[in-house]
Amino acid sequence: MKKYPLKFCPVCRYYLKFTKVDGRKRLVCQKCGWTNYQNPLPVVSCVVRDRNGRILVVKRNIEPGIGKWSLPGGFIEQGENPEEACLRELKEETGIVGNIEKLIGIYPYKSKTYGSLLVIAYEVKAKTGTIRVNSELKEAKYVSGNNLPRIYFSCQRKVIEDV
């Protein structure tokens, strides 16, 4: 098992110990029984289409994948549902306001930076057209399906295939 930074229970501050729970080794408090379940982080991605059917791609300005092309998206924040997070991330990153057309799918993804992710992908139709990238992006543009650049994240390549 890999090294884990947690040594003390976040509830009662007693020592944690690896114990088999539900067939897996998990950190468990030996005093209060708190169990550390390592669940995937929820993120959203979107395939945004303009009125001509072109897809919005973004060039990342942050790791992971700095300088690489991807789809808009990001982490779901506390108190948000996935649809709200999708539209918020789209607007924050690109200035584009859109409407969710449909759920494309849900994809597990292993990230070297963040560990296990659960990617929730939507198809979005753009309502506003002017692109204004924030500091997380170097560039954003609409491209036709046959001119798509290589998308850095394999789960997003699968999303595009599934749309």
Image (cartoon, helix red, strand yellow):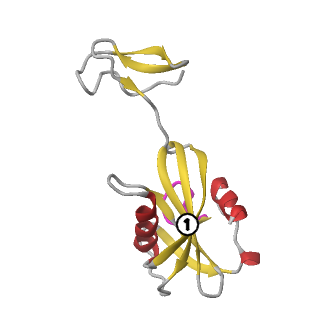
Please tell me whether residue 9 is drawn above or below residue 96 in the rendered image. Answer: above
Q: Is disc 1 surrounded by few (<14), some (14 to 19) or many (20+) residues within 10 Å? A: many
Please tell me whether residue 130 is drawn above or below residue 49 in the rendered image. Answer: below
In the picture as drawn, the residue positioned furthest to the left comes out as: 12
Query: Residue 158 location, x and y as percent?
Result: 69, 57
Relative to residue 86, is residue 161 drawn left or right?
right
> Which amino acid is tagged 1?
Cys
Q: Main secondary structure of the magenta part?
A: loop
The part of the image, by quadrant, that contains residue 16 is top left
Query: Residue 145 location, x and y as percent?
Result: 72, 76
| Quadrant where the C terminus is found in the figure | bottom right
Query: Residue 138 location, x and y as percent?
Result: 51, 72
* Mark 1 lies on residue: 46
Q: Secondary structure at mark 1?
A: strand
Relative to residue 10, is residue 118 drawn left or right?
right
Residue at the location (47% across, 37% down)?
39
In the picture as drawn, the residue positioned furthest to the front comes out as: 102
Question: Which region shows up in magenta?
Answer: 60-68
